Image (cartoon, helix red, strand yellow):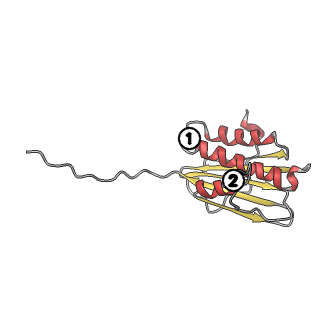
Amino acid sequence: MDLSEYDRGFGGFGGFGGGHDGERAIRLAGSPEQVMRARRLVSETLGRDHPLHDDCVLLTSEIVTNAVVHSRSGRGGAFVVGISRTAGGVRVRVRDEGSASAPCVCRASDEATGGRGLPLLEALAHRWGLVRHAESTEVWFELVLERAELPRVRLARVG
């Protein structure tokens, strides 16, 4: 997919600083088949070799699905997906057309076929949040590149 179809400047992601590598956003119809396009935006913006690729694509799929299933976006409306990457991480946000009730981080039963999106977001994202307006809801998450710290081990002295 040619990324030129995406808008630049999704209103900025204030507070997520350092080494900005651009922002991309796309407005999509609120239908289930558009979840794949949202995942593709994230995948192609990051590249498959990016260390946060898989988690970003998974979490994007979850919050876009929530927008389609639980908001007015899924009843003939639309939603916007934006992604910003910096040297230190990635931020994704989805703005839908709102709903009557706030999103819930509820625990699904083992037999439930849904209800795991926001708990998964809570488990994997370094930070996430939501902002409700009169006519929209925006859910966002950030994943941060972390350096692995190896424990220092003293080697036994030989001789």
Q: Amino acid at mark 2?
A: Arg
- Relative placement, left or right, of 76 versus 63 is right
Q: Is residue 129 visible?
A: yes
Task: Using a 10 Å C-alpha cutoff, classify the residue at mark 1 as few (fewer than 14 neighbours), some (14 to 19) or many (20 or more).
Answer: few
Residue lying furthest left: 159
Q: Nearer the viewer, residue 9 or 35?
A: 35
**Residue 95 lies in what quarter of the image?**
bottom right
Depth check, front residue: 135 or 26:
135
- Return the residue nearer the eye: 51 or 20: 51
Image coordinates of residue 156 in percent, x first then y, are 17, 49
| Residue drawn at 54 percent across, 43 percent down | 51
Measured in 3D between alpha carbons, the distance from the residue under mark 1 to the one under mark 2, in whole angstroms, is 25 Å
Mark 1 vs mark 2: give the one in front.
2
Residue with the mark numbered 2: 116
Identity of the residue drawn at 83% across and 61% down: 136
Residue 81 visible at all: no
- Mark 1–mark 2 CB contact (< 8 Å): no
Element carrying mark 2: loop
Q: Which comes sooner in the sequence, label 1 or label 2?
A: 1
Q: Position of residue 94 (x, y in %)?
A: 75, 53
Image coordinates of residue 49 in percent, x first then y, are 55, 36
Looking at the rendered structure, which numbered label has been put on residue 137? none
Secondary structure, mark 1, is loop
The residue type indicated by label 1 comes to His
Q: Residue furthest right?
A: 76
Of all residues shown, which one is farthest toward the top? 1
Residue wearing tag 1: 50
Residue 34, quarter of the rendered image = top right
Q: Quadrant of the N terminus?
A: top right
Coordinates of residue 35 in the picture (x, y in percent): 77, 42
